[in-house]
């Protein structure tokens, strides 16, 4: 493999997503490399890509299965002018960009499961995490937007405990895909969606997100800390909160783990 197989897709001026790409054969987590580069002053849009992660991280303290030679693991440094409380919207924006990429290669089977899962035929193919870095006064300094996409993972590569819930683009489409081309599409579509959300607000990208929503109209259970609520999903609002119909009222849900009745969480 060349030193940086992703060099050819670096594009745009500093500040645009993917204008500079740092590539590593192996890292603990691209989130950690991004944290160091951000502390050294790396500009917005700088992306870190690794072929393999030894300690890939998911949400809620989970690990992210990150074998070599198969998938896309990237973290993008963002420096948005937005309140800390709005950072979770960036996960939704990233999910939308991934869905846009997947719709090109696997049309008609892409779904978004609030808050941060992308599905192909109801199984998780991608997840994202938006980690906020704040200054001493608690103001947002930057966001480390991590995205993992299962690209060429085969069914036998999937650990037993994930087999019923996870998939890859290859499993869903029956052929292998070029990770560099996918990263190129991802950075380009994420750049458009991110700029749109920054300039016009999350409400501007909400209709596109809703078109992929796999939960709307479904009965779900949501667990946040010790609290569990059941209801029917009515969509998301202009801030990206899930609208859960409890029967007597519709509640805004800003965080939690969703389980869909009759499907895998
Ligand atoms: C989730 O669905 O729980 C989020 C998964 C995020 C995985 C990506 S892979 C690239 C980046 N580095 C990490 O350690 N995690 C994110």
Image (spheres, rainbow, N blue to C red):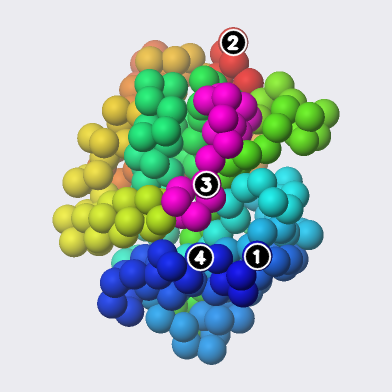
Query: Pointer 2: residues within 10 angstroms few (<14), some, or many (20+)?
Result: few
Indicate left or right for 109 with 162 as reference: left
Q: Which residue is located at x 69 percent, y 51 percent?
A: 69
Provide residue 61's location: percent of width, then percent of height.
71, 51
Query: Pointer 3: residues within 10 angstroms few (<14), some, or many (20+)?
Result: few
Q: Distance between the residues labelled 3 and 4?
A: 11 Å
Which mark is first along the chain, 4 or 3? 4
Provide residue 85's location: percent of width, then percent of height.
40, 59
Q: Give the range drawn in magenta.
A: 167-183
Magenta region includes residue 176: yes
Indicate which disc residue 178 carries. Answer: 3
Indicate which disc residue 1 carries. Answer: 1
Magenta region includes residue 232: no
Residue receiving disc 4: 6
- Residue situated furthest front in the rendering: 2
Residue receiving disc 2: 262
Which mark is first along the chain, 2 or 1? 1
């Amino acid at each position: 493999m060349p030193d940086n197989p992703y060099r050819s897709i670096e594009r745009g001026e500093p500040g645009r997503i993917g204008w500079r790409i740092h590539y590593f054969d192996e890292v603990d987590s691209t989130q950690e490399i991004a944290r160091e580069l951000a502390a050294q002053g790396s500009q917005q849009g700088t992306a870190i890509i690794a072929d393999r992660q030894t300690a890939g991280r998911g949400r809620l303290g989970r690990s992210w299965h990150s074998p070599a030679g198969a998938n896309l693991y990237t973290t993008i440094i963002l420096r948005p002018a937005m309140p800390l409380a709005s950072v979770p919207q960036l996960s939704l924006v990233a999910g939308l960009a991934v869905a846009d990429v997947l719709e090109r290669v696997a049309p008609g089977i892409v779904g978004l499961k609030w808050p941060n899962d992308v599905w192909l035929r109801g199984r998780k193919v991608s997840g994202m995490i938006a980690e906020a870095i704040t200054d001493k006064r608690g103001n947002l300094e930057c966001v480390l937007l991590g995205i993992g996409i299962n690209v060429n993972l085969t069914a036998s590569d999937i650990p037993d405990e994930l087999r019923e819930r996870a998939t890859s683009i290859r499993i869903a489409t029956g052929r292998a895909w070029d990770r560099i081309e996918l990263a190129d599409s991802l950075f380009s579509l994420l750049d458009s969606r991110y700029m749109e959300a920054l300039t016009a607000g999350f409400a501007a990208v909400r209709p596109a997100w809703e078109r992929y929503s796999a939960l709307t109209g479904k009965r779900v259970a949501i667990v946040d800390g010790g609290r569990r609520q059941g209801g029917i999903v009515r969509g998301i609002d202009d801030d990206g909160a899930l609208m859960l119909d409890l029967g007597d009222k519709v509640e805004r849900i800003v965080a939690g783990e969703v389980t869909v009745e009759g499907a895998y969480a």
